[in-house]
Amino acid sequence: MRFFSLRPGWPLTALIVGFPLWWALGLGTFIFPILALPMAVELLRRRPIKVPPGFGVWLLFLLWVFASLVMLKANPPGTRSGSSQIISESLRIVEYLTATIVLLYAGNLTEKEMPQRRLTSLLSYLFLVTVGGGLLGLVAPRFQFTAPLELLLPHSMRTNLFVKSLVHPTAAQVQVVLGYSAPRPSAPFGYTNTWGNCLSILLVWIIVGWVIRGSSRQRIIGLIAVAISVVPIVFSLNRGLWVALGVCAIYVAVRLAARGKVVAVGVLAVVLVGGAVAFVVSPLHDVVTSRFQHGQSNSIRSYTVTQAITGATHSPILGYGSTRNTLGSAQSISVGKSATCQLCGNSTIGSNGQFWLVLISQGYVGAILYVWFFIAAAWRYRRDKSAIGMGGVLVLLQSFVYMLVYNALIVPLVLYMLSVALMWRNDMQSTSGSTTSPALSRRHSAPFTPQRATGLHR
């Protein structure tokens, strides 16, 4: 069946609705570029392609990603190249291009083809899946199985830790964080940090899509799901997730207060205080307190961050095209990875935050371009008083927290781009339906031009 004979928007629906299946098949990472192909085909048939304001900044970032490849053979002092550097960087490039296609595809779908309400409902559904995966990780932390895709790979690839994280479905990462082995939910993603990142993004959209704008049934399901999510959120031990949710609460309170919504602010305050009291008297309080007292990863994070900054100063323009491994460890240059200890030493620079990944890979210029795109989007839509506008900005605010501690490729980055697409479409719809001048309306729906993409026309 040809792509154009299917209902418009089907690749996006298949991606989200079928995600539990893709994860079980071992395609949780690879399904994104796979379904990006029919998205790209449909986009080419829609020419001219509309682009969001400031898209030129993102294009410059992509250009920098490719330009930085000339530095792959160079190494900053005190580092060495990884054995699978070419493979991992090629995968990252594909993931960046995939996220770009998803942004343009979602943004170019009309309201009739993919209503905003349907898109937020799809993201709400994915929140339910993520919460379900979190509960599975707590109830059955050792649950795992060999995926069909994994069976097709040669033994050497299946035993590689990086490859295994991509294709081997597991319910949780069992780690010694609190002084004893404890499960940290990860399903339906490869890592618990990715789970926490995605959960908080999707939490925004289930509140927007179902709690605020949904039917009575959706509102009830949404509220129950949000309440249940507190348990895996706490037991995930993801401090970055906790900080991001705190930032969201503060931002919502400030926005409501600025709009004179005194009653809403009061209700929010009562809910937060009541939740805090319930939290303090429950066993969850002991878990959080213990987590902050056990910061074993702090030294590793600070070490790799320092190495990323140091490495970038040696190649500030282009970076080194990809990550690098340190010689030795934070304790000693002689402590490195071995056959008996695959996780000892030789830390990967850029593995503890998207910003640090871009910094070592594409230098200061690339890092500025990456951050600039999301800052510009958050700033542009900051005055959108709709639920979608506030929700989208909330997601981007979270991205600034997460980029310092978690990597965004690929699921979180796609969710960021879908959030930008929702705000962009919301802006175009509100403009076309308002009494603004025709020139202004054309500005929001114009096809791609270099001036429009970079925002220099403004």
Image: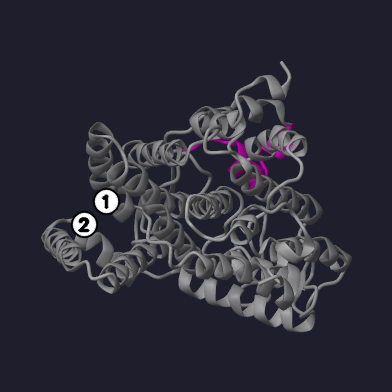
**Where's the N terminus, which quadrant?**
top right
The residue furthest top is 1
Q: Report the residue marked by disc 1.
A: 230
Front residue of 446/23: it is 446
* Residue 323 shows in the view: no
Residue 283 position, x and y percent, is 17, 56
| Residue 284 numbered tag | 2
Residue 98 position, x and y percent, is 69, 46
Q: Is residue 214 left or right of residue 442?
A: left
- Start and end of the magenta stretch? 154-170
Mark toward the start of the polypeptide (1 vs 2) = 1
* Residue 251 shows in the view: yes
Q: Secondary structure at mark 2?
A: helix
Q: Callout 2 environment at 10 Å: few (<14), some (14 to 19), or many (20+)? A: some
The amino acid pointed to by label 1 is Val
Corner quadrant of residue 86: bottom right
Q: Is residue 268 left or right of residue 154?
A: left
Q: Is residue 207 left or right of residue 89?
A: left
Per the picture, the main secondary structure of the magenta-coloured stretch is helix
User: Is the residue 262 above or below the residue 138 in the image?
Assistant: below
